[in-house]
Image (cartoon, rainbow, N blue to C red):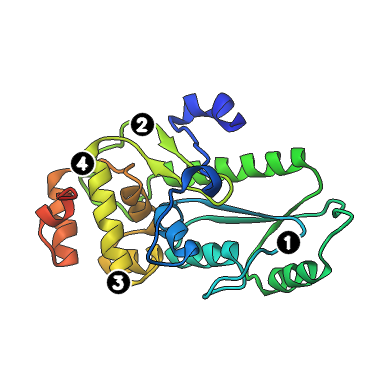
Amino acid sequence: MNWNSGRSHDAHVVLRPLWWEMDAVPGLGVDAQSVLNRQLVDNADILVALFHSRLGAPTARSASGTGEEIDRAVNRGIPVHVYFAEMPYPYAVDSLELDRLRTFRLSLRGLYGKYSSNEELAAKVRTAMDHDVAHFAALSPSGHLPDEEQPRPSPVAAAAGDGVWSAGPGTIQRTLGRNMRALRQAEGVSQEAFAALIGVHRTYLGGIEVGLRNLTLSSVERLAERLGVTPFDLLQGPS
């Protein structure tokens, strides 16, 4: 990934694209999209969706699998970047799929991107990744707990395509982030709503969830008190 060669050293971040075709593993008991949601989408911190001439197969919950992934990511409050190709369509393009894609495009709320070549797309995705990395790394003056320690430089993985950003500093930081995310998802709320509930800034909460915040024990104690759990609950790894 070109972003890594030019920026990862200075940013202390490594972006690692994950694609469902290569990175998902088979699972049964639920529909295929739910398996992808559990393995990739619900653990992602950045989602990039690309459309050319097809919207994709519908799911039980959305007009397409990618549409469902976008909805879930938006509801979680993570960065979502959607790009539509403005390139020549294949000769045998499905006109019904084009109509579905146009309808979906009109239904989007917010700002989406367009590209007319692969080179333009790459440049726009690099700009988006620069923005997101800076966002995750920034310390919010109004949102952090008083005695927070500075995060150590650490390799972080992000995703282009329907993929995943996963942080990789210390085990305790990752465990804390995973448990905070599980508590939020159990409440069924976005990062922004959950941050307001516990009295911190969304940027700060996002940094915790991806393992970038190196909290002191007293900070963990205060977070636990606000959440109505014990510090052990926040730091306990999977059994």
Q: CA distance from mark 3 to mark 1?
A: 34 Å
Q: CA distance from mark 3 to mark 2?
A: 30 Å
Disc 3, disc 4: CB below 8 Å? no
Disc 4, disc 2: CB below 8 Å? no
Which residue in the structure is indicated by mark 1? Answer: 54
Q: CA distance from mark 4 to mark 2?
A: 14 Å
Residue 172 is labelled as 4
Q: CA distance from mark 1 to mark 2?
A: 38 Å
Tell whether 144 sits left or right of 31: left
Foreground tag (3 vs 1): 1
The three-letter amino acid code for the residue at tag 3 is Glu
Which residue in the structure is indicated by mark 3? Answer: 187
Identity of the residue drawn at 38% across and 45% down: 139
Which residue in the structure is indicated by mark 2? Answer: 154
The three-letter amino acid code for the residue at tag 2 is Ser
Quarter of image, res 111: bottom right
Tell whether 20 sits left or right of 223: right
Where is the N terminus found, in terms of image quarters? top right
